[in-house]
Amino acid sequence: MAMSYEDFLDIAKDAAKTRHPEAEVTIQKVEKLQGESYVGLSVRPEGKNAAVTMNLHELHDQVVENPKRLAAVMSEFLSGLDKALEQIPQVDVKQFTEYENVKGNLMMQVIPVEPNKEKLEQIPHKTIEDIAVVYRIDVSDSRHHNASVLVTNQMLEKFGITPEQLHMDAVISQMETHPPTLKNMSEMMAEMSGGMMDMPESPMWVATVEGGLNGAAVVQIPEFMDQAAEKLGGNFFVLPSSIHECLFIKEDGEFQRPQLEEMVQSVNATEVSAADFLSDSVYHYDSEARVFEKATTFESRVAETAVAYETAAPETAKETMTVLLVEPCKYPRQVEIGTDLEDLQKAVGGYIEVTYPFDENVGLVMNEEGKLEGLPLNRALRDDDGQICDVVAGSFLVVGLTEESFGSLTPDQMQRFEQQFHQPEVFVQMGKGIMAVPMPDNGLRFEKKPEVRAAEKEAEKAGHEKKTDIPAKKPKKVKEESR
């Protein structure tokens, strides 16, 4: 009867305890992404706050195949254990409790959703159709390359930040510590051959990070995707060849989605391990809308837009709505703007994000990437206890909500939210938090109302027509100070 894995672990545990009597030796289940969880042997040396955990399934398979090799396999196991214990690092626990020590070492990883459903419930993540973005803390050093710790919900709670803040900081950190790379496939082949191969430029481009580990996460770096679109000349397909890299192919008609899907699925079935698998789907980057999505989703979106355009009444007057515009360093003002997406984007200076922080039918339309782009902080949003829960960067709109879309504010809503956001604010970092301070009036940028400017022009025109010798009074100068 073949030796069970449990019995093999017990033998290995006794051998490890004999070899290292001062160490703590236990059998533990190791939870990992990509369905790679396993039960292994954990050995923590005396005086160390980190342990070595070894997956012994391959060694067990050798014994099952040839029971006479048990002694040799145990010798191989102990030799590997000794080497691993020599390299075990001393972990700085404070590194994982203080967010300021963490955010500069954050990195992203993209994984498939389906094989990781249970694990994703325990970790902060961002889902894009059938793939998810998770976050790691890089703990590599000169001796331990490619060592990282997965960020969990429990860690995020200790950090005291939101998943959105974690994602934003991870993007910034990734750009600095694991910068993305984009090389033509022919260039990659030439490097692999030591310069022996001289090939014409390929339609395929390899996107990854320096070092290659978890390089497919570059699809979540907006700046890199925009640079890739510029290099490729517009929209492009994204082939998720593994969690470590993606292939970019320009959307120029030479390749069609079904053809590319067949290619991806064939490579996944024959070349990619379960641990490295990312997706059987072909993705697409819309360079104009700056949207990363499945190619099928892109096709549906374009088709819906075309149908909507064809069925729209050509003579329909453009709809407008009366809303409140809140700009940094200025008092709020009532404005009349169009209801189209382009009108909202123009008002906030970029792609929009909508949030609903109040218990009534109003929404805040703001710049989706205001903080990432470093737009000036504008107003604080507060919870029911008056504590700051978020800060809006850049201009934003307070809009009413209809059953289907956005609409005008009621006069009562206009008055109340003008009062709520009336005084511009400046922000001061206070330890881990931030404090909002009302901006003094002498620091504001004043803007005359349209009716005031019109009246001044009429008065100026009338004065010229009279051509009197009486000199006009000089207007008082209003000192304008920028923030």
Image (tube, helix red, strand yellow):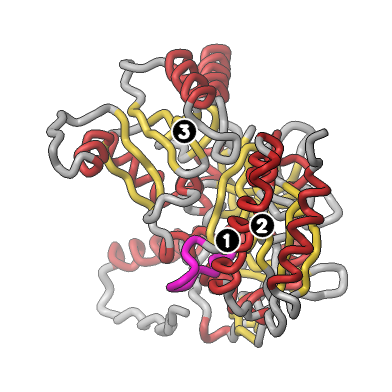
Q: Relative to the observer, which residue lies in front, 313 or 66?
A: 66
Give the residues in magenta.
Answer: 137-146
Q: How many marks?
A: 3
- According to the picture, the residue beneath numbered tag 3 turns out to be 241
Q: Position of residue 42 (x, y in %)?
A: 73, 63
- According to the picture, the residue beneath numbered tag 2 turns out to be 54
- The 10 Å Cα crowd at callout 2, few under 14, some 14 to 19, many 20 or more, is some
**Quadrant holding the N terminus:** top right
User: CA gap, disc 3 to disc 1?
Assistant: 32 Å
- Residue 328 visible to the viewer: no
Q: Amino acid at mark 2?
A: Met
Task: Please state which of the two labelled residues, at mark 3 or mark 2, is closer to the viewer.
Answer: 2
Instruction: Name the side, left or right, on which 443 lies relative to 360.
Output: left
- Residue 479 highlighted magenta (yes or no): no
Secondary structure at numbered mark 2: strand
Decide: is 328 above or below 40.
below
Report which quarter residue 397 is drawn in: bottom right
User: Disc 2 vs disc 1: Cβ atoms closer than 8 Å?
Assistant: yes
User: CA gap, disc 3 to disc 2?
Assistant: 28 Å
Q: Position of residue 289 (x, y in %)?
A: 46, 37
Q: Residue at x 57, y 31 (%)?
A: 279
